[in-house]
Image: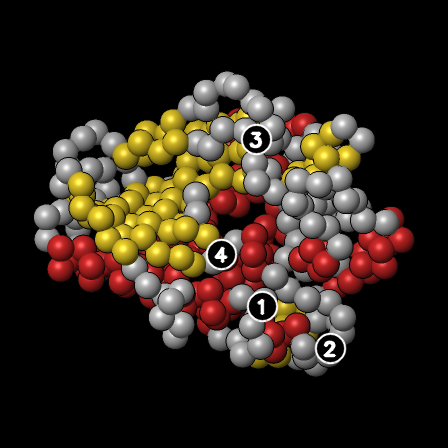
Amino acid sequence: MNEALHSIVYKNSQGFVTGHFTAMAGSCEVIIETSDQELAEKVTYAVASEAWRIESTFSRYRSDNIIYRINNADGAPIEVDSETSRLLDFADLCFEVSDGMFDITSGVLGKIWKFDGSSNVPDQRDIDRLLPKIGWDKVTWSKPTLQMPAGMALDFGGIGKEYAVDSAAQLARQITELPILINFGGDIVATAPPISREHWLIGIEPLALGQNTVPPQVALKHGGVATSGDSKRYLVHKGKVLSHVLNPKTGWPVANAPASVTVLSSNCTQAGMLSTLAMLQGADAEDFLRSHEVEHWIQRR
């Protein structure tokens, strides 16, 4: 374990203990309403350890995990463990309900799309070369065996962080019934409302590029909150902001996608799925979320 990266810093304020750490390329925090420092540190360490475990297990940037084995199988069948099976089942569900728009094989597009705020759009010929390597329907998945054509690759980035938050929250609940808020870079779970106030108050990040409207705040008692958006990851092309959410069928950013979609649901995995699927709906994002009758907030430019 890299001690420099895998460290936790604690802060105490007004009856709450907050543990800060880094995981999944972002800042994470665990807030516990307690005066018991030892308990707070036990919970936070369990949460952080779960985040680090899931990151190492499913990161596509490592060469020692199941994702590496799948992506380097060169067309051979791979038998996967039960946890990976659950994520593959969920990815399959997302693919089906989105009519193929949510596709965990589309991560290869990240080789040519760099959403760094610039105007550097890839050449269409480069996009066309990658499109044949995309398509969950080209993968054979029969639990516990997965077989994928050579040259294709899986990426759990679209569901991994939300899954990690829910998994960590489950561990925290096993340790204590005290109110806990877990935040992995904007993917959030509350195990219970605070004792000292009615709810947790979650701010939605305002839009980038000079948007002046004050975004709403989410009053969260329990459940999950997830946000999909382009406040940090976007391109500017022909005067328009291009979202980092890509259409796997065209290889281009989804047309008319909202700048930000935030969804509140019973857990973070569900909220993340709905917020991402709404982004993939483009101009129809609002109608999509209204049809699912979930509390949501959408920001457009």
Helix, strand or loop for disc 2: loop
Residue hosting label 3: 208
Q: Which kind of residue does numbered mark 1 sit on?
A: Tyr
In whole angstroms, how far apart are the C-alphas of marks 2 and 3? Answer: 42 Å
- Crowd rating for badge 2 (residues with CA inside 10 Å; few <14, some 14–19, many 20+): some
Helix, strand or loop for disc 3: loop
Residue sitting at 61 percent across and 46 percent down? 97
- Crowd rating for badge 3 (residues with CA inside 10 Å; few <14, some 14–19, many 20+): some
Residue sitting at 81 percent across and 56 percent down? 131
Residue hosting label 1: 61
Q: Which kind of residue does numbered mark 2 sit on?
A: Gly
Residue sitting at 49 percent across and 39 percent down? 227
Q: Residue furthest front?
A: 4
Q: Nearer the viewer, mark 2 or mark 3?
A: 3
Helix, strand or loop for disc 1: loop
- Say whether residue 283 is left or right of residue 52: right
Residue hosting label 2: 75
Where's residue 248, x and y in %?
73, 50
Image quarter (top left, top right, bottom left or bottom right) of the N terminus? bottom left
Q: Which kind of residue does numbered mark 4 sit on?
A: Ala
- Say whether residue 5 is left or right of residue 196: right
Q: Which kind of residue does numbered mark 3 sit on?
A: Ala
In whole angstroms, how far apart are the C-alphas of marks 1 and 4? Answer: 12 Å
